[in-house]
Image (spheres, helix red, strand yellow):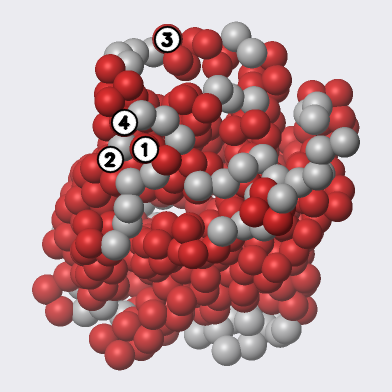
Amino acid sequence: MVNETPQEQKLDFKRILPVLVIVLVDLMGLSIIIPLLPLYAARFGSSPFIIGLLQATYPLMQFIGAPILGRLSDRFGRKPVLIASQIGTLGGFILLGFANSLWLLFLSRIIDGLSGANISTAQAAIADSTNEKTRTQGLGLLGAAFGVGFVIGPIIAFVILAASGQNYQMVAFAAALFSFASILLTTFWFKETVGETEDPASARKRPVSFSAFKNALNRPAMLFLLAVMFFYQVAFGGYEQLFSLFTLTRLGMDARDTSGLFVLAGLFIVVVQGGLIGKWSRQKGDRWLVLMGVGALALGLIGTGLTPAIPVPWYDKAKVLESMAGQGAFRVSLQSINIALPEESARGWLGVLWLLIASFPAALGGGVLHPAVNSLITQSSEKNEVGSALGLSAAIYSAANAIAPLFYGALFQWFGGPVPFLAGGVILSALWLVAPKIVKK
């Protein structure tokens, strides 16, 4: 009987701390603009379907770029690929700040998406720095850093919007500032992790080709896990990307109000990923986490779709329209806003309280699924293909995120706001029924 050493049982927190801090700063920049982007597009006369198309642009471009960058990180190291990705993100945010038309919004997301391997490269660095016993906890802490970013980012967005009189451009420039800070942190603090697991020279000799992706897909366990990643994110992607449009049209909540909901969801995800997921993984295993996460998400999405159409008590239709129109040189005409807002009659607390309750199981499922599935993926990969496997996982994740807003945007426009969320809940319910046969430990 072989006893595990304390080093094998415990996560080396100091070793992964630079990655966590870099992701935290990076995600603060990203999360600043997430509640804002659908409303940004609505200012230029976009319909729900066009807003969905805009939201799909980033993950579609990431689907193209992430696997290649993941393979490059196996060959040349995590650090140079991470810096290149962050430079692309910085450029996208700067362009977003200067955008005065819809096509510039699309171009900013294309640039960011093509270089968007920040998270998958950070996941690979965590995988380099952990073993099978500590990997889920390490990836969970990475998710917790993601969650903290989603707490702080919307707060910063709220403050900037309040101080600048709903100046969306200032929010984009603040996101660019955080992106620049993450580049500095990666350049001067982050230490390369690929050389810790193998000889860097031998890694550079491996060709950058699609054979590694083909090998991954030939493994049944890997294929099943990628299928789970795809279908759960198709369902959840629409929830994330059209949530602010749903709260606007269903409850009359503007960007500042929705930022508050993102803060609450982020706090809950931090608790789950930072304090609970490691314990649950050790006690019950990653398979249990996946099954529980899918079921919780299904419940949360169905609950969201059933949210009563009762505007919040402070709702003022004229003020919401004014906040969307913006100020100064970047102000748009109120007539160009084609999104239907609720009337002011029958305002109350029921709608927002219902949505808050439904958000908890949704946040729980979203908090555990991604790190649990990726942990199982790394365990099914060869040591020298972890970056490729996580790049492929990121590509599948991005493909789902590209499909989801198009599908949900069409449902939103043609059948109403609740329908896409109910559809997501049905997809997840079906996945929950078949997952025990697909997900094997």
Which of the pair 433/48 is nearer the observer?
A: 433
Return the residue at label 3: 211
Which of the pair 250/59 is nearer the observer?
A: 59
Return the residue at label 2: 81
Pointers 4 and 1 in contact (C-beta within 8 Å): yes
Tell me if residue 120 can be seen.
Answer: no
Pointers 2 and 4 in contact (C-beta within 8 Å): no
Q: Earlier in the sequence, mark 2 or mark 4?
A: 2
Task: Name the residue type under label 2.
Answer: Val
Query: Can you tell which of label 2 and label 1 is closer to the viewer?
Result: 1
Label 4: few (<14), some or many (≥20) within 10 Å?
some
Query: Can you tell which of label 3 and label 4 is closer to the viewer?
Result: 4
Viewed as shown, does residue 238 lie left or right of 52?
Answer: right
Q: Earlier in the sequence, mark 4 or mark 1?
A: 1
Residue 373: where, in percent of width, then height? 66, 38
Image quarter where the C terminus lies is: top right
Return the residue at label 4: 200
Could you say which quadrant of the image residue 99 lies in? bottom left
Q: Residue at x 22, y 57 (%)?
A: 187
